[in-house]
Amino acid sequence: MRSIPAPTEARGRAGARTDLAADLRRRIVGQEEAIETIVPYVELYQAGLAPEGRPVGVFLLLGPTGTGKTRTVEALAEALHGSERNVLRIDCGEFQMEHEVAKLIGAPPGYLGHRETQPMINQHKLNAVASERSALSLVLFDEIEKAASSLGRLLLGVLDKATLKLGDNTTVNFERSLIFMTSNLGAREMMAELAARFGFAAAEDGSASAGKLRRIGVSAVRKRFSPEFVNRVDRTLTYRPLDKAALEAILDLQLEALERHLSSRLGPASFGLELSPEARVFLLEEGTSAEYGARELKRTIHRHLIQPLARLVLDKRARPGCLLRVEPDSGGEMLSFTPRDQVPLAA
């Protein structure tokens, strides 16, 4: 039997591998099933035991928008490579027409524009999202249900044999890749199921049956994709709507990231933030909802915290090393900033 060498990263980490699951739990909130499902595939690769001739793992992530599907892939990239940008991301909304799918692989020789058409996926781009820390590449097909049916047929070879033939007859090898596909298929029915059975308050408490939501998602997938496509997916994960505790935890993560951003960008001139309970409620009400989950939270923090802070810095009203107390203003429509023992600063 032919000997298969283990990846360099596996040999180099013997006895000293970091706990990937614990790392992901610090980055992903409210989706324990996803962590428990994905981590073993990564460990299989790190141990040198991933199967030959196919991707390391193929995952279909279902559920309502704002529940963390795309964030899961970004968090895995951060844990493996040190940056959420180490993902080869394909926005499937750009390939809704059959002829647009050709942009993925490039035009074949002899076709008009062959030399000018560079494929969106090639071996160089796939390898570029790996890193010195890990040779495992992460590929994300975002909102796969929006793509033309020809994209699904094109992916059959990738999901089954880990190969993609480009227009110039070169081949891309996906054997050292984890492939993720996100979809909102069945999301509307899932939310209707939650609302019909329990109402919004109960939906926040996560009281609905996970099995029922999973069946709704899988049924929608089987209506949209062929059996050949569905059978090539290793695991289908259904993301539940985030409850109040999960949304509060996500806010904490976003605020911690903001503090790190201030420290790295401003250096010795940076300052701290202290949000009142009312300010936290303000951000949660503005940035989260039952329909969109936590999708708007980052933009809300940017609009109500980062942009006002930029004005305070430019006006030299935020002293280096001070602590800014953040509270809603008297009108309740924006936040005010108060340095310790000073007059409140309206944003």
Image (tube, rainbow, N blue to C red):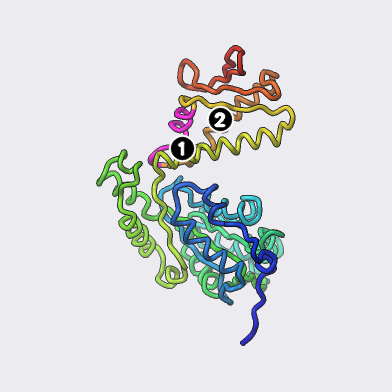
- Residues 215 and 146: in front is 215
**Residue placed at 39% from the left, 42% from the top?**
243
Q: Position of residue 121 (x, y in %)?
A: 63, 62
Magenta residues span: 280-291
Whole-number angstrom distance, CA of label 1 to CA of label 2? 18 Å
Q: Magenta segment: does it hold 289?
A: yes
Front tag of 1 and 2:
1
- Against 200, is 330 above or below? above
Dot 1: within a 10 Å radius of its alpha carbon, few (fewer than 14), some, or many (20 or more) residues? some
Mark carried by residue 121: none
Of residues 48 and 166, which is closer to you in this image? 48
User: Residue 143 location in percent, x, y?
Assistant: 48, 54
Q: Where, quadrant-wise, is the N terminus in this rendering?
A: bottom right
- Residue drawn 36% across the image and 54% down it: 186
Eyeballing the image, is 283 above or below 97?
A: above
Which secondary structure dominates the residues rendered in magenta? helix
**Camera-nearest residue between 289 and 147:** 289
- The residue singled out by tag 2 in the image is 303
